Image (cartoon, rainbow, N blue to C red):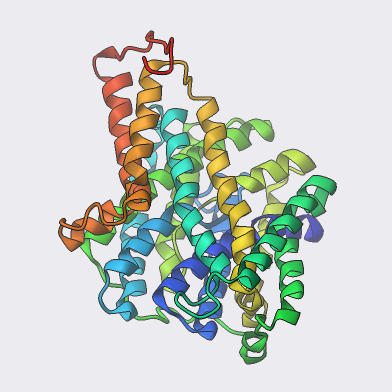
Amino acid sequence: MATTGLQHVAAMYAGVVAPPLIVGAAVGLSAKELTFLTGACLFTAGLATFLQTLGIWKIGARLPFVNGVTFAGVAPMLAVVDSTENKDDALPVIFGAVIVAGVLGFIAAPFFSKMVRFFPPVVTGTVITLIGISLMPVAFGWAQGPVPGADDYGSMKNLGLAGITLVIVLLLRRFTTGFVKQIAVLLGLVVGTLVAIPFGVTDFSPVGEADIVGFPTPFHFGAPQFAAAAIVSLCVVMVVSMTESTADMLALGEIVDRPADEKTIAAGLRADCLGSAVSPLFNGFMCSAFAQNIGLVAMTKIRSRYVVAAGGGFLVLMGLCPMAASLIAVVPRPVLGGAGVVLFGSVAASGIQTLVKANLEKDNNVLIVAVSLAVGLIPIAAPEFYHAFPETAKIILDSGISTGCVAAVLLNLVFNHIGGGRDDDEVTAPME
């Protein structure tokens, strides 16, 4: 149970620590504060995993389901950071929005489980693809170095370290099997960090400064603040997260021969939302299912939810050990950038895999994907596109995930639901 539980932690570790690293760097946190934020996210991921696997009352799918910080919230949170004049207020504003989104999601869970038909693969696939694409600029920024404008920013040394890390991850994925293959990204970070030592870009001081035992002090970064625009943006993310979790529960139910019915889905969504609402109390972000762990269940054929709960226990222990959390702060940004290309690219590829199931031979679905992706890519392709809009509106509009999701849902309603849709129209030529 211990070793298989650790394997689940290894498979999702890089995904859990990436969001706090991205958001913490944008806020301008010191290495010590970044370590604290990372530990808090590990701790809350463990609590959310307990809720999902063991369950209490009508909360928790009671499936081998790993929960952690969702990637879907990263771009909207960065938009909140960019629009917050005093960066010290950025995290409290984010935490306040996550709490409200979590509470509203908890209330809506039983109703949402009945609305799955409005979130078919054409919608979920588009949104997941946008999540991966929206995060790619972060990986490219990391690859260039920690400080934009510095003399070595974008230097051959930094880009070379990113490239070496990327190659290591690819080689491990290509020539290894089983457990080693599953933790290729984690091993890539370790080897890349070791390679970076002779270049003088590896700083081990965060480990020396970190305590062996610590607790994520409630509201360490300040009491939550409630800003309307941030709340709306994170509520959209909650809808995306609930949609993704629903799809994951359906897939996992098939794998473990216990098909997820409406009651199971509602209980699982309650766990997601309650975990998200409680997470900011301990300085964590919005929680959702980790799809890579579903693949791990399918590969290992170990279907016990108690094994995954053991993994949640390890996450809690790591969150209570700042020294363990500080190890990720040692990894140089260029090394993180090389691994980030694989990590974030895999999210986009997962979305494309979902789109394959979306009946793209239908003209309606091609239009939905085309327009939704275009709307979602505006903040990346043309960052100043919404410059004339009010600041509160820009928090929502500057998140391609939020705008792309809204566009996909509305277009799906118009083309495939209202008036019966026109599902019989097939694409007969690329321009038709």
Residue at coordinates 32% horizontally, 47% vertically from top-left?
378
Query: Would residue 324 be seen by someone viewing this image from the given angle?
Result: yes
Relative to the observer, which residue lies in front, 373 or 64? 373
Vertical arrangement, residue 150 with respect to residue 387, above or below: below
Residue displayed at 64% across by 59% down: 339
Depth check: 385 or 30 in front? 385
Question: Which residue sits at x=52%, y=80%?
Answer: 151
Q: Position of residue 402 (x, y in %)?
A: 33, 48
Q: Nearer the viewer, residue 225 or 199?
A: 199
| Quadrant housing the N terminus | bottom right
x%, y% of residue 427? 42, 13
Q: Is residue 403 left or right of residue 27?
A: left
- Residue 83 position within the rendered picture, expressed as x and y whole percent measured from the top left: 27, 67
Q: Furthest residue to the bottom?
A: 209
Tell me where residue 123 sits by quadrant: top left
Vertical placement of residue 31 versus 361, above or below:
below
